[in-house]
Image (tube, helix red, strand yellow):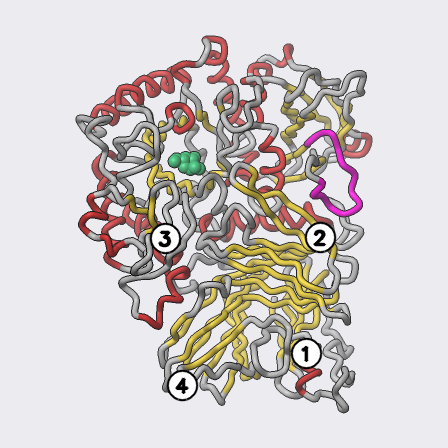
Amino acid sequence: MIRYENGSFLLSTPNTSYVMQVNRDGYLGHLYYGKRLDRPLVQDFLRSEEIPSPSVKPGEKVSFLDNFPFEYPASGVGDFRENCLEISDSEQVFGFEPLYKGYIIKKGKPALKDLPASFGHDCETLIITLEDNVRGVELDLGYCVFNDCDMITRWNVVKNLSEKDIYLEKALTLCMDMELEGFSVIRETGVWAREHQAFFTQIQPGVVATESSRGESGHEAAPFIGLVSSNATNETGEAYGFSFVWSGSFLGKVWTNSFGLSRLVMGVNPNNFRWKLKAGDEFTMPEVIMTYSSEGLGKMSRNFHDFIREHIIRSVWKDRQRPVLVNNWEATYLDFDDKKLIEILRTASKAGLDMLVIDDGWFRESKVEPEGGLGDWVPVKSKFPDGFTPVVEEAKKLNIKLGLWFEPEMISIDSDLYRAHPEYALSFPGRVPALCRNQLMLDFSNPDVLDTIYEKIATQIRESHFSYIKWDMNRPICDAYSRYLPADQQGEIFFRHVLGVYKIQEKLLMEFPELLIENCSSGGARFDCGMLYYSPQIWTSDDMDPVERLSICEGTELIYPVSTMGAHVCKNQNDISGRLVSFDTRGLMAIAGTFGYELDISKLSEEDLKKMPAQIRLRRELDKLINRGEYYRLSSFDRRGYRIPGSIAKSYDCMEIVSRDGSEAAVWYMKPLYEPDSRGSRIKLKGLVCSADYDVTVITDADSYFNPDTALLNKRAISGEELMNAGLCLPVIHGDYTGVLILIR
Ligand code: GLA
């Protein structure tokens, strides 16, 4: 619901409200974001009569604006905090004064030009126009308020109505000026194989920031920033979350001044960004989705999950059972050929798998080093003398679908494409370009490059009927010089690169609407809402060790639904950690995700092979629950000390997914290290029906789901009331790295 009354805007979702007001000088101020209000605010939260030093009267621009809670601050007019918009022109004149012009309210949600964006029907859009007449520039602030969930989204459009070209030096999407005493900022950090580690920093005067300048969202930070009140837990206290619908460099920052005013901003990273806005043109800033919860962090996550599932993911696969696949990467790395794949296919068929994904290596001569072939995208003769035909025919015979790996944004120096078009690679004239995995970045600002790469991918899909592609991205952007763009548009490369990625994925989905895309970037370096608009699942991490995955998954689940998280059963011993974990535990833990195998199944022991059909069947039976259920974090296994301030470190990890009607739930539990002479954990479940009776089965392997007599615990008729209040008494679980799945029905 959106209401406008006496210069105030009141935006309300079922449980939250957001209030803005225009002040007497025409500046748009931010008054409130929090628990739902049903009546307009009456006090002067803009503090119009206060006189901050060194001013001598109220409203004197320089100090007044420096403390004014701006809805959207711009540079150069007296607010010296972090601003969102910086405009210059050919004379290097800066500054934009954002003065209120008017508003419109309309039903539904507009699409954003060339950008991924949320969508929906049961929602309303507010556009507030700010203008700077001196510069001839207008700014439309876009807000969409959803009625079915607690989510408000924001984006902006800058319009150059003047007669001369201007440059956007900075164009951040969101500003929130708030008073956040005692709050902590949540950021996610990480590296390859250790993505999405959530950590909390208490707010003090100064800056707490999270960012990527790599041209992708990156391992080091996720395009998300959150806030939690000092008393927050997973179930209580206040939490705010802001997630960016963008897959490139970004900035999220909380800047707090000495009066305790905090300014939170989020948007495209101003590093390596300068956009030429020709006279008459407009520029759309990517969307931020934001939510507020008065029921702790858990509700914030559930708000994100619901919204992402309903209003971000478009794929036809969203609610369908996704294929249970085997991926050959860790099975073979680059050393494979058609015969090896046929061997894997035959075992896959016996085990009941749906798909084989052919990973990196099919287009390269090398069996060891990732070098050569990127950009050509043809099966290499030495590994595929008859192309994909023998594999395609065998797969058809066995009724198994095929998927193929690409890294479309890259080019190898040793490729026919590079030999024919060295100008397609980004590189500074006169400097040897930096290589990473022996590869260079393609210039995705050049439409010929996009057309060429599109055709190469589409040709493989058309010829061999691939029904899935894994779109990988294994190096950041540097040497960002385009031979296609003119001199004064080189600052657009990073932004245009991401637009190019979106454009190709969009075109693929137009030509192949049934295609399942799984995005990936050296594991989970591009896990964001932008990519989820094109692919319903993303590879979470190259680290598949179930113990390592605990914190990776917890951080990812803070924002994204479990059903979007790529999870595979890895080999024993794990290649990254060296850890040995039983096939049963690896299987049960990977079920909390899209599920597949990433080991040489043709070499599995008879015993493990026999277990695969039960694991696959169990995953299929839980599909609806995992796809549609609600997520609760019951305990965090905290090794690194990144946890909600004041919370207690636990020796076990526990996560629950419960159906919306409370009729069934699945709970994943793992205590990584066995403690001698310890007692079983007691866990309090969530979301069940108090008066209902449940059967509770605790299983250490998928087989015992189908044969509950062998389960660790098999108890009938425990009430929902007991399970949620007194808790579930788990038996002692022996051994290190043992996970159990608890099924409640
Ligand atoms: C990245 C991906 C892996 C695999 C390799 C192939 O690291 O995350 O899953 O596809 O590339 O080179």
Q: Please, what is the three-letter code of the amino acid marked with disc 2?
A: Thr
Question: Earlier along the polypeptide chain: callout 3 or callout 4?
Answer: 4
Residue for badge 4: 162
Residue for badge 1: 66
Q: Mark 1, mark 3: which one is toward the viewer?
A: 1
Q: Depth check: 404 or 262 in front?
A: 262
Q: SS of the residue at dot 3?
A: helix
Please state if 356 lies on the left or on the right of 373 as rendered: right
Compute the Cα span from label 4 to label 2: 43 Å
Q: Quadrant of the N terminus?
A: bottom right
Give the residue displayed 18% in from the left and 50% down from the top.
420
Q: Position of residue 673 (x, y in %)?
A: 70, 23
Please state if 264 lies on the left or on the right of 449 as rendered: right
Question: Is residue 645 within the magenta segment?
Answer: yes
Callout 4: few (<14), some (14-19), or many (20+) C-alpha neighbours within 10 Å? some
Magenta segment range?
Answer: 641-653
Q: Please, what is the three-letter code of the amino acid marked with disc 4?
A: Ser
Q: Position of residue 373 (x, y in %)?
A: 26, 39
Give the residue displayed 59% in from the left and 38% down from the top.
552
Callout 3: few (<14), some (14-19), or many (20+) C-alpha neighbours within 10 Å? some
Magenta-colored segment: predominant secondary structure:
loop
Marks 1 and 2 close (CB-CB < 8 Å): no
Q: Please, what is the three-letter code of the amino acid marked with disc 3?
A: Val
Marks 4 and 2 close (CB-CB < 8 Å): no
Compute the Cα span from label 2 to label 3: 34 Å
Callout 2: few (<14), some (14-19), or many (20+) C-alpha neighbours within 10 Å? some
